[in-house]
Amino acid sequence: AKATAVDQELLKKGVLDFRGGETAAMERLQGWMFERDMLKVYKETRNGMLGADYSSKFSPWLACGCLSPRTVYWSAKKYEKQRVANQSTYWLIFELLWRDYFRFQGARLQGKLFLPEGEGLVTQEWVEDDAGFQAWAEGNTGWPLVDANMREMRATGFMSNRGRQNVASFLALDLRVDWRKGASVFEEFLLDYDPASNWGNWAAAAGLGGGRVNRFNITKQSKDYDADGKYVKHWCPELKNVPNSYVHEPWRMPEQVQKSSGCRVGVDYPAPVQTRFAPPEGNRGGGKGKGKGKGKGGGGKGGGYNPRGGDPTQPSVKSYWAEKTTGNDVEEHKPRAKRWKA
């Protein structure tokens, strides 16, 4: 009974009380698109992470067959005719096209969709990092944006599109863990899971599509899309009293600030897991967080980017994209693509 009560409290923190069935699906479509007129500003709000209406959230009903993509399409066209046709209506329809794209990809690739190298257009070497993967899966990496999104998914079965891109990039490109492990976790927890979209998006996030590879700068994304820290504090209550200037990078907090905010890094909240893009400075002491923090801490202070993941004693791991990082929001890297045979 106690566990059930905890689960119910976590569900109340979710963005929406998802109910199955066609009736609930049509109520959501009508309410979001027409009654609250949210489609008009979809392009401006779709990167949100808190609240019921920043995005359509049709995906669970689409995945379960309670809502037809054709119904969504023709409803959007009706909206354009009756109200306004703008970039927001374009983007909603464009998302439906992406959904179709991954289904066609899945039909084309079949079993290759689940291989570590995908369809084999690029080469990549994954590393075994069980502790890092476990911290990621449980939302205890010490990187607030990653942790908040993973905790939200585990508690409610939903995660925003912005969140999915960031946590996938972090696991596959920062930790270099086999992307299929991440896809399997999504398969386990997401209400809107479907094979084509899930595995296709994960392969793309891991850079296996043969085109550009987007590595998301987690700290900058966190500051850009959760400037006031409300989202990370919502799902990581250990950070609730941390000043906004440190909430996205708690490892930077001086000891006195950690004490006054009741958030000791490595004790109350995990020290950040070591990645190939180590946090530039601050508290990187090890230790498990009190009751929750299971992220492994690195030794001493992070000395900026280190291609060996911050540990000079470890051999470097070859990658198909450039060994560099910048302060950019999203970095684009060109993979070493295999040549097609004539």
Image (spheres, rainbow, N blue to C red):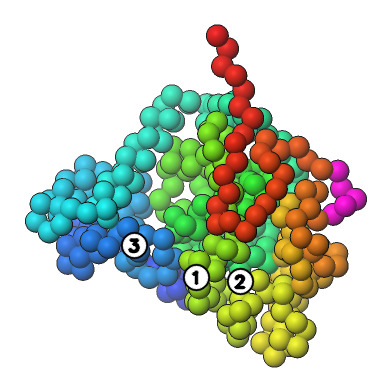
Instruction: For the C terminus, give its image quadrant.
Output: top right
Could you tell which of marks 3 and 1 lies nearer the N-terminus?
A: 3
**Could you tell me if residue 151 is visible in this image?**
no
Q: CA distance from mark 3 to mark 1?
A: 14 Å
Q: Position of residue 156 (x, y in %)?
A: 46, 63
Say whether residue 72 is left or right of residue 4: left
Q: Amino acid at mark 2?
A: His
The residue at the far right in this view is 313
Residue name at image x 78 percent, y 40 percent: 317
Q: CA distance from mark 2 to mark 1?
A: 9 Å
Q: Are marks 2 and 1 in contact (CB under 8 Å)?
A: yes
Q: Position of residue 190 (x, y in %)?
A: 46, 53
How many marks are shown on the rendered structure?
3
Residue density around tag 3, few if under 14, some if 14–19, many if 20 or more, within 10 Å = few
Residue name at image x 31 percent, y 54 percent: 58
Q: Amino acid at mark 1?
A: Asp
Quadrant of residue 302 within the rendered picture: bottom right
Residue density around tag 1, few if under 14, some if 14–19, many if 20 or more, within 10 Å = some
Helix, strand or loop under label 2: loop
Q: Are marks 3 and 1 in contact (CB under 8 Å)?
A: no
Instruction: Quickly name the residue at label 1.
Output: 226
Q: Position of residue 304 (x, y in %)?
A: 76, 60
Q: Amino acid at mark 3?
A: Glu
